[in-house]
Amino acid sequence: KHQWDLTPLEDLALRTGPNDTPIHMVFSTDCSPYQHWQSYQFFLSALRVNQPGRVTQIVSGCTNAEEQSIKDWHAKHISPLSFRFGLHLTPDFSHPSGNSTVTYEFF
């Protein structure tokens, strides 16, 4: 529990920005412990300042075990903070195989 936790109604009220403007903040990380810690701080900062809209972390290049660990950790520690906080896992796109069609088809 954090002192700035939101009630379900407060969280629902933040689903959009002023004048019902849709807002979606997206940030990307890899699977390193350092970026994992930074992403946790990013979510907590969004919660603390009552950031409106969705906040999604894109995590790329994890092994299967790392993916499962991140999913479990997100479900336990991030999802309870806000229904607006999401997670999206992708393959490693830092070294494309030369077939850009396959890379773009993922999205």
Image (spheres, rainbow, N blue to C red):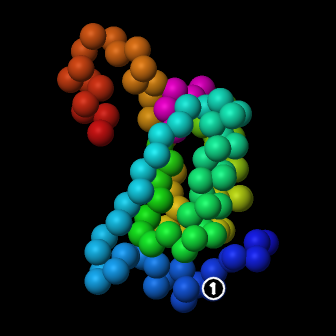
Q: Residues within 10 Å of mark 1 (few under 14, many from 20)?
A: few
Residue 37 versus residue 22 in the image, above or below: above
- Does residue 66 appear in the picture of this structure? no
**In x, y percent, where is residue 21?**
29, 75
Rendered residue at 35%/66% (across/down): 23
Which quadrant holds the C terminus?
Answer: top left
**In x, y percent, where is residue 53?**
42, 69
Left or right of residue 106: residue 27: right
Q: Dividing the picture into quarters, in which one does residue 35 lie?
A: top right
Give the amino acid type for the residue marked by disc 1 in the picture.
Thr
Left or right of residue 88: residue 48: right
Front residue of this view, candidates 57 and 88: 57
Which residue is labeled 1 in the image? 7
**In x, y percent, where is residue 90?**
44, 35
Front residue of this view, candidates 43 and 49: 49
Q: Dividing the picture into quarters, in which one does residue 2 lie?
A: bottom right
Total label count? 1
Residue lying farthest to the bottom in this orientation: 9
Which quadrant holds the N terminus?
Answer: bottom right
Rendered residue at 55%/86% (across/down): 10
Residue 106 versus residue 38 in the image, above or below: above
Is residue 88 located in the magenta-colored stretch of the structure? no
What residue span does the magenta drawing correspond to?
59-63
